[in-house]
Amino acid sequence: MPRPVSIKDQTLIDAARAVFLERGFGATTAEVAERAGVSEGTLFNRFKSKAELFQAAMHPQFEQLGWLADLETRVGQGELREHLHELGTAGIEFFRQLMPLVMMSYANPSPSGLPEALTQPNPPPLRALKRLSSYFEAEIRLGRLRPVDPELLARVFLGSVQQYVFFELITRAQHAMPLPLPTFLRGLVDLLWHGAGPQQPVPRDSHLTLARSAP
């Protein structure tokens, strides 16, 4: 008699994540089981309820901060404005995957009223804010940015990226898309640069030039 095929928990979790993203929390465990190629009984042998399966499926996405993985290696290297543009692009793609999960998770929270991943100490959003703040602080120390509050700069950057994706989601049904992504990112980086970019040194003889040009 052949041995039964062993199904890994991760296979079930991946199937559940795909189904919940497509159908929302209203998706049934039967749909998840069909996607995974198992019986519902197999699901409930591993997960006590649909809510537990949902939490398991959503949790890894909250934890992943891959778009910020190489921040430390960027400090002092290359063109800073280009780095900001690349970070914004990666952040948009990250939040396009995460935002629907966040919205579903708030609709089906843990007993604390928050998504399970946000109840832990030092939750992912706080870690992201700290990493961006540290990155901006390092660039400020090198003189590649003005001496502004690095956390404020991180909040503006992070919040703008999140807001862009949020508006994509809530305007999709009305077919009223926000600014095209290239326009948004270029404008965001320009706005930050004008507010936080390094100040240009004033030429030593500039006062003479101004004096000569005065009427």
Image (cartoon, helix red, strand yellow):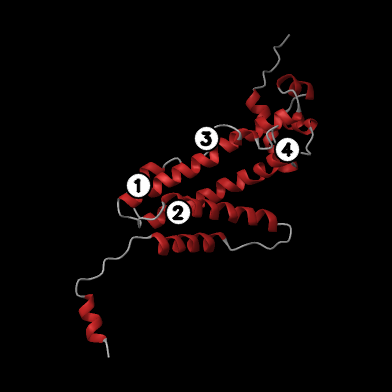
**Does residue 11 appear to the left or right of 77 in the view shown?**
right
**Kind of residue sitting beneath label 3:** Asn
Who's the residue at 23% across and 77% down the image?
Answer: 207
Who's the residue at 67% across and 36% down the image?
Answer: 17
Q: Where residue 30 sits in the image (x, y, percent)?
A: 80, 30
Query: What residue does disc 3 label?
Result: 122
Query: What residue does disc 2 label?
Result: 153
Who's the residue at 59% across and 56% down the image?
Answer: 164
CA separation in Å, label 3 and label 1: 22 Å
What secondary structure is found at the residue carrying circle 4? loop
Compare marks 3 and 2 and give the one earlier in the sequence.
3
Compare marks 4 and 1 and give the one earlier in the sequence.
4
Q: Quadrant of the C terminus?
A: bottom left
Q: Are marks 3 and 1 in contact (CB under 8 Å)?
A: no
Compare marks 3 and 1 and give the one earlier in the sequence.
3
Q: Where residue 195 sits in the image (x, y, percent)?
A: 42, 62
**Viewer-proximal residue among 172 and 161:** 161
| Tag in front: 3 or 1 | 3
Q: Where residue 48 sits in the image (x, y, percent)?
A: 74, 23
Compare marks 2 and 4 and give the one earlier in the sequence.
4
Badge 4: residue crowd in 10 Å (few <14, some 14–19, many ≥20):
some
| Residue 138 tag number | 1
